[in-house]
Image (cartoon, rainbow, N blue to C red):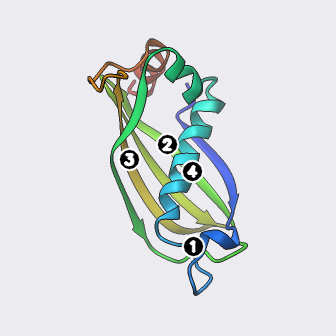
Amino acid sequence: MLNEHDIEIRVRYQETDGQGRLHHANYFTYFELGRTELLRAAGYNYRQIEAEGWMLVVSEISCQYYLPAIFDDLLRLRTTVVEARGARVVNTYQLFRGETLLAEGRSVVACIKPDGRVARLPKALRLKSEKISE
């Protein structure tokens, strides 16, 4: 099971604040991109999950900022699944410029049915998640 995945992201001008630094809210957008691409690299995607009757929703998210990312920086985001069982997936994130750690984050994503009821993770994710916890 793929439980860690890296992507490159270049900071775009519209993502920055008046000082040319990546706006704090956009770190969460990057984390979303990391989760989406990790899932895709593992052979699954959000469209499939929703078509099969599940939704994955963020129930908790946080970010610790260390150093700013600047317009046109090429960044590397590492997304890691640290837990995936029951009805939730816990991910951590590390955002780097070169070898310099700029920020770290964590999210909890809950699995629900379209009517809002909590549901166990889809079987394909559950099977993969069992391998993570070994």
Q: x, y (%) of residue 16?
A: 60, 75
The answer for how far apart the CA atoms under marks 2 and 1 are is: 22 Å
The kind of secondary structure element at disc 4 is strand
Q: Examine the image and state in which quarter residue 132 appears.
A: top left
| Residue kind at label 2, given as amino acid type | Thr
Which residue is tagged 4?
78
The answer for how far apart the CA atoms under marks 4 and 3 are is: 13 Å
Q: Are marks 4 and 3 in contact (CB under 8 Å)?
A: no
Which residue is tagged 3?
107
* Disc 1: CA contacts within 10 A as few (<14), some (14-19) or many (>=20): many
Residue 105 versus residue 112: which sits nearer the camera?
A: 112
Q: Please tell me which of labels 2 and 1 falls first in the chain.
A: 1
Of tags 1 and 3, the one toward the viewer is: 1
Residue 134 is labelled as: none
The kind of secondary structure element at disc 2 is strand
Q: Are marks 1 and 3 in contact (CB under 8 Å)?
A: no
Q: x, y (%) of residue 58?
A: 37, 42
Q: Please tell me which of labels 4 and 1 falls first in the chain.
A: 1
* Disc 4: CA contacts within 10 A as few (<14), some (14-19) or many (>=20): many
| Residue kind at label 3, given as amino acid type | Ser
Number of marks in the rendered image = 4
Q: x, y (%) of residue 107?
A: 38, 47
Residue 80 is labelled as: 2
| Residue kind at label 1, given as amino acid type | Leu
Q: Are marks 4 and 2 in contact (CB under 8 Å)?
A: yes
Which residue is at a point 69% across and 68% down the rendered structure image?
12
Q: Please tell me which of labels 4 and 3 falls first in the chain.
A: 4
Q: Is residue 14 positioned above or below 63 on the image?
A: below
| Residue kind at label 4, given as amino acid type | Arg
Which residue is tagged 1?
22
* Disc 2: CA contacts within 10 A as few (<14), some (14-19) or many (>=20): many
Q: Is residue 58 positioned above or below 63 on the image?
A: above
